Image (cartoon, coloured by chain):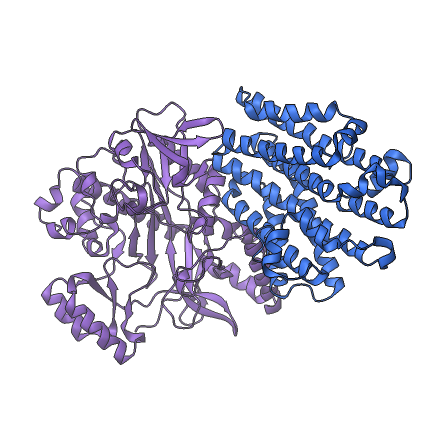
Amino acid sequence: MAVAFDEMNIPGGDLRPAYQELARWLKETPPEALEYRRQEAELLFRRIGITFAVYGEAESTERLIPFDVIPRIMSGKEWTLLEKGLKQRVRALNMFLRDIYHGRDILRAEIVPDDLIFQNPVFRPEMNGQQVPHDVYVHIAGIDIVRTDAEDFIVLEDNARTPSGVSYMLENREIMMRLFPDLFARHRVAPVERYPDELLAALRSVAPQSASGEPTVALLTPGVYNSAYYEHSFLADKLGIELVEGRDLIVKNNEVFMRTTEGVKRVDVIYRRVDDDFLDPLTFRPDSVLGVPGLMSAYAAGNITLANAVGTGIADDKAIYSYMPDIVKFYLGEEPILKNVPTWRCREPKDLAYVLDNLSELVVKEVHGSGGYGMLIGPAATKATIEAFREKLKREPEGFIAQPTLALSTCPTCTASGLAPRHVDLRPFVLTGSKSTTIVPGGLTRVALKEGSLVVNSSQGGGTKDTWILDE
Amino acid sequence: MLSRTAENLYWLARYVERAEYLARTIDATLRVTALPAAYIGKTNEWDSALLTAGVAASFYQTYEEANEHNVVDYLSFSADNPSSIRNCIEAARLNSRSVRTALTSEMWDTINSAWIELQAVWSKGASTREDLAKFLRFVQETSLRFDGSAYRTMLRNDAYWFSRMGVHLERADNTARILDVKYHVLLPEEEHVGGPLDFYQWSSILRSVSALTAYHWVYRETLKPWLIADLLILNDTLPRSLASCYGNLVRNLDQIGVAYGRQGPAQRHARGIRNRLEHSNMNDIFQHGVHEFIQEFITDNSRLGEIITKQYLI
């Protein structure tokens, strides 16, 4: 694997401009002071209750995502390019979804193969011909971005279903401002705090026509045991909307109502953080107790907007991912600004043969996996693991894609033996309303805390950092 | 507001209030049982503590004997006792998480920090008297802090009123239960005893509802059983008296009624109980029978709980 791109240091000893002030500050700050503030940050996270649950552990376990106090910094110029690329990408995702559930031009043009859509479990036939307000499907997108050099931004994954992590972007900033006011005074960091306002504006802008002039928005959560529950309550609070569970909602005459102390009240827009499968036991999984019976018929009647729309999984599916550059070109007639990771589709015999020959150098992912589970990282795997994976791959090649092992960029990070480079990625959050697409400057930087590790997922030992976009 | 939110706020307040009451009861019992036997007679004060907490039956399924060790453990740290202090704090935290959006950050911080702090205590219990005293004080302080932060930081809207209703309903229940268990030492016939034995029983009752000092301020008298009963039942200047709790419950329910533009059975039922308390005097109550009076009150009070639930919370 190539030497990773260091976001702070230029080989030869110089510093990248965005990091110059931070480096000066680090020199002036004794390591004990950093450690002290790190502990303070952890205490704050616990007291605020910013925790998540790990599935498979006892229900009551709540864990903290480790927070690294060294910010990740990007220049305004870098951000401008990234922002443009993100808007382009999300525009294409929305157009793709609109097309897949209506005219299917892209299939007729043979850009994307039919069976990848129709045999895909995340394709929702219920959405065929269904109008969604303003043709917005993905109101909230979390696009995972990595870097391998100073020039390009690469999309690792599009998250178009119920992306999470934005509360960390906001809380990390709050805590950093509390702990390091001096460091902020020496930089011009673009603020992120208007995210909740922009989210609420986007959600209200897509209310159905039958809604009143002041549409009612609610956030639907699976409940306190969900791993992202903290985020749900945090966002509902910041938006000033009700945090509802399935049992709080009822459907009458194809309208959705919430049960309140004053009787029932109509809901117009649901920012749902419940997966498609669990939304409505009458349409999807009948054993779901998290959903609302009849919700899909109210949706079909056009009386409720779901954000994100049902069926968006078909756009962020790992099998579709490899077609994204073509999808961007097809709908927008533009060259994609953000790059894709070169991807071998194991469903194609030629690609499969290559992958099988080069397993020890590749990353192989399950098409329907997420959270870093079920993945093979060739260079880090033992021979036995690779062989076991080879068998899995041969048995069900269409279930996998493979990519080269990327040398993810690194940022200075606090470790037991002082500051050291660790691999990072970035998830910016892209909001799409009826009129505009907006992105607050920043996002969630995830960092692989173990030396050499490339896995940044919080469920597997990743941490987070505050992300600074300098306002030049 | 969402019915579920109102329900959570209401129960959250009840759990915190109950935890405080249990802590006070244990505190008061420890004091009275530390006295030489001649001062307290033959009654088993730990048994009374179980009765006032309403958990005697379930206690004896696990334990043989109601002694200090067993009862303190069961009321404070037991995971099996649904209304132990531990489970009250756990339930309060779970309720708080479910309604974080309706809590102010000060209220959340109070519950969450207490919960974090107490995690360490649950597993090992209290090994010394000092530990126990510290723990009981901590629980009472948590309740005070919670109450104070609600009072100082919450918007005065239905969320606040539902939470206050939880406090007052639980408080009325607790005061009534103490009276129910101890009514016999308050009966006038026993006045002739008047010896140290009753004195310590009486002061223990007052202590468990933090009214010992208040008694002296109100009556400027030595402890007299009917005055104690008067204070706890009818005196509406004492925040834990039944009269005061009902004055507040009626007010909170009226505020909700005005805000929603609608009265209902809960308002009528609460007003009925308050009127009865307002038009009673201790003479009548003693004639009618203190015990009967209290038992009726306990039934009426829990009936109000059911009516509120039906009218607003589901």
> Looking at the picture, does residue A280 appear above or below residue B139?
above
What residue is shown at x 69% (from left), y 59% (from top)? Answer: B66
Q: Quadrant of residue A406?
A: bottom left
Q: Is residue A320 visible?
A: yes
Left or right side of A447 for B241: right
Left or right side of A149 for B91: right
The N terminus of chain A appears in which quarter of the rendering? Answer: bottom left
What residue is shown at x 72% (from left), y 30% (from top)? Answer: B243
What residue is shown at x 11% (from left), y 46% (from top)? Answer: A107
Q: So how many labels did they put on this image?
A: 0
Q: Determine the colour of chain A.
A: purple
Looking at the image, which is closer to me, A197 or B287?
B287
> Looking at the picture, does residue A400 appear above or below residue A194?
below
Image spot of residue A251 (x, y percent): 33, 31
> Looking at the picture, does residue B4 appear above or below residue A40?
above
Image spot of residue A261 (x, y percent): 49, 29
> Residue reaching furthest bottom?
A383
Q: Determine the colour of chain B.
A: blue
Image spot of residue A292 (x, y percent): 34, 38
Q: Is residue B239 visible?
A: no
Looking at the image, which is closer to me, B170 or A313?
B170
Looking at the image, which is closer to me, A203 or A46?
A46
Looking at the image, which is closer to me, A187 or A450?
A450
Q: Quadrant of residue B167?
A: top right
Q: Quadrant of residue A92?
A: top left
Left or right side of A435 for B225: right
Image spot of residue B72 (x, y percent): 68, 58
